Image: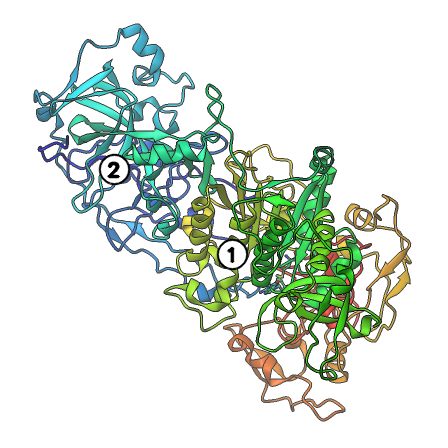
Amino acid sequence: MPSKRKASPATKPESSSGSRKSKRLVVERPDPVVAQPSDSDFEPEPVLSSKKKSTRRTTAESSVVACQSESNDKKLKKPTVEKAESGVASPADRDFVSESDSATPSKKSTRRAAVKVEPLVDSVAESDFVEEEEVGGMELGSLKSLSISPSKRKPKRAEKVKDEECVLAGDPVPDAEARLKWPHRYNKGKTNGTKSLNGQDDPDQLIQAKCHFSRADVDGQIYYLEDDAHVKAADGEDDYICKIVEFFEAVDGVQYFTAQWFYRAKDTVIKSHDQFIDKKRVFLSEIKDDNPLDCLVTKLKIVPVPSNATSQFKENVKSNCDFYYDMKYLLPYSSFISLPPDTTSPVSSSSTISSDIDAGEVKEHNLEKKLLDLYSGCGAMSTGLCLGANSKGVKLVTKWAVDLNKHACDSLRLNHPETQVRNEYASDFLSLLKEWVQLCVSCSLIKGSVPPHPHLKVTDEVDEDEENDDVGEDSGDDKEGEIFEVEELLEVCYGDPKENNKPGLYFKVRWRGYGPEEDTWEPIDGLSDCPKKINEFVVKGFKANLLPLPGDVDVVCGGPPCQGISGFNRFRNKENPMQDPKNKQLDVYMDIVDFLKPRFVLMENVVDLVKFSNGFLGRYALSRLVGMNYQARMGMMAAGAYGLPQFRMRVFMFGALSSEKLPQYPLPTHKVIVRGVIPVEFESNTVAYDSVRDLELKKELFLGDALSDLPLVENNEPRDEMPYTDEPKSDFQHFIRMGRDGLLGSVLYDHRPLQLNEDDHQRVCQIPKRKGANFRDLPGVRVRPDNKVEWDPDVERVKLPSGKPLVPDYAMSFVGGSSSKPFGRLWWDETVPTVVTRAEPHNQTIVHPLQDRVLTIRENARLQGFPDYYKLIGPIKERYCYD
Ligand SMILES: C[S@@+](CC[C@H](N)C(=O)[O-])C[C@H]1O[C@@H](n2cnc3c(N)ncnc32)[C@H](O)[C@@H]1O
């Protein structure tokens, strides 16, 4: 029963990333201009750096007690950040970490409205960030700082706790037992290495106990340890939800309970994108707070749902509880992790679709792990994943790949003959998968909850002569009345292959008596006379894994293009990026995951996912995964930190079915120089070490490490293949030149550049061959003290033989004249920012250090980590398109 007493709001975890123990991407910060703001850069002095800082935790308006003290603050490298708008930090902003697998729990404070917040630094406009752009000065993330009005009031608890409505009840826990169970409460002055509440080591920060209890009486309700309860929040806010993990009387006589908090979805990183998540579903955090007893409002029934629970169990739970939880929410990398399985009562998870495939075959198949690469390009991501998995003994194979770019598909096919490469829209692929399941049901290949395909009725009594009856309607273009006979169905697709605005399921037909040049796409309803042919095709396709069925896929990987959030797009929909058709692929990607239910998901995307519109799409994607009952986490990794001579920071979202172990992020192996800016709230999502101490990381790779062994080629190099001329000069070169057979290759493919036109070639020829050279070094260009270019009035504008200017206007005006990228030469001792897919030198640094040309296809591919044996197909320009 809810209390009639008006309790004071409870202590809740405070907002933001501020209180995270600082993690370190393995970083050198040689250049304050381009480096990511360091922890100290964020220090909003003097708010958290002085003794005053601690007051915000202990003095917010009413009688809230926090566990942290000044000494904790001193440990922090980042400021605590709360939302300026409301003045109340939402649980989503909390950032004290207590994940067992990495970070150390940190501090917290009250969430009360009394916290007054003033902005310190305006948010960086997302549009300001273009990774490849020069950063003209230190940019700070969405940093706001606190100015606390410390309440001088002491907690009123002391008066209140003696109230008979609100007391610790029963006999105290025997002293020896209490000291054993909660040593941190009795250790004042001793540092025995025990982690205290929220992971702080300093016993001085903890409220010291006189004794512990195992129950309390609050408003006539008896609360026991491990009970779940509603806890009073600030007015207008939903009551907090907790598990009671301690009852104790402090040395000063005040009586407390310790709350371990449950988060609603909206309290997690998902924030307002909680529409995919059941309102009764909460997430158990590892965050704990001490609160006065009278914050308890009422008991709750919160039921844990183990990862092996049946759907029936889940349904029962939902209708018989206040809340339920099947996952923990851990702050590092915004992780949602399943509860362990209940081993005491084994419960089987029932699949909706079962295959009739022979059991022996299933066993065999299980040895191989199947991967679907969505938006595959020519397969960089899946190739890397499979190579990595194989090196660890996991036989991961790219079974299916989907991309709408024909040339990318051709390249993928060439290098992966084992892959069913589908050159189509991902949304059409999803429609096809749905139809395919129905076809398989029609052909009795699988049993499932879906009905058979409406256009395919296969009966056992197939007439021997049906072969001859399998005729399709003519396509209408041919001689009137002519009947064509179907010889064989060759392919299937969903879409509009005849381009007559009739999207649907189509088969490619080989007509009897006609050759491949007469093959046509025919809609399934036009083939209603040919059930046997369709049956044959489906059975063959099923056996050959032509298309994945739900439950078939081990891993879905891919980076759905979200051009609607790109920094290059000036018309981005900030309010609701998911209404922008340019971001639709994120939903298509998740819909495919939802349909196929792969065991693991790996989604990669640009950092704008967490930068644009307050991280809208990152939160949305996590919400979709968690809403589909996937465990999930989101981290950011820089390719350069793993041994590529390219920085390339990307977001990697992991998903895993609740029955699987959600993978951890691999930690960096190489030092990198951090570029770009990550919003403060997501800073701690950067995959990094907790400390750089004692780390022996490899030196970052430079352009020279990757390319110095490649033969000299000209701007007009015509050869697609040539011999290597030099031995590998670095470990990287040795590795990248190794063939599939583990031996060094002898033929070098694709070492030719996109040929510059004569004017551009002339321009490039005049760029000096030294580090940092670019169009600014050409005659007539002057650099002002503000680092912008202007024409030198004393120099007459130089013309090329064509009559065009040597220095084009677009170079002078690019990024308001502040860019040094046009016609920029790369240099041997540089890590490239991020390789782009356009090989033009007009607005990017892509010219070879010593040769008068842009990087070749092979050089570009090496910077991406493609092995030299990976051949690309298509026009030269298209062969660069593999990011
Ligand atoms: C950034 S690239 C992907 C690179 C790829 N992940 C790799 O590792 O090489 C994005 C790809 O998405 C493809 N694409 C864009 N929209 C698509 C759609 N609606 N359906 C399928 N592919 C699409 C593009 O053709 C492009 O190859």
The residue located at (61%, 51%) in the rendering is: 442
Badge 1 density bin: few <14, some 14–19, many ≥20, Cα 10 Å: many
Q: Is residue 100 left or right of residue 357?
A: left
Residue 1: image tag: none
Image quarter in which the C terminus is found: bottom right
In front here: 830 or 99? 99
In the rendered structure, which amino acid carries the disc numbered 2?
Tyr
Q: Quadrant of ligand 1?
A: bottom right
Badge 2 vs badge 1, beta-carbon distance below 8 Å: no
The quadrant of the image that shows the N terminus is top left
The disc at residue 607 is 1
* Mark 2 surroundings: few (<14), some (14-19) or many (≥20) residues within 10 A: many
Q: Amino acid at mark 1?
A: Val
Q: Is residue 26 visible?
A: no
Any part of residue 351 in sight = yes
Residue 376: % across, % down: 65, 57
- Which residue is pictured at 85% across the width and 43% down the height? 742
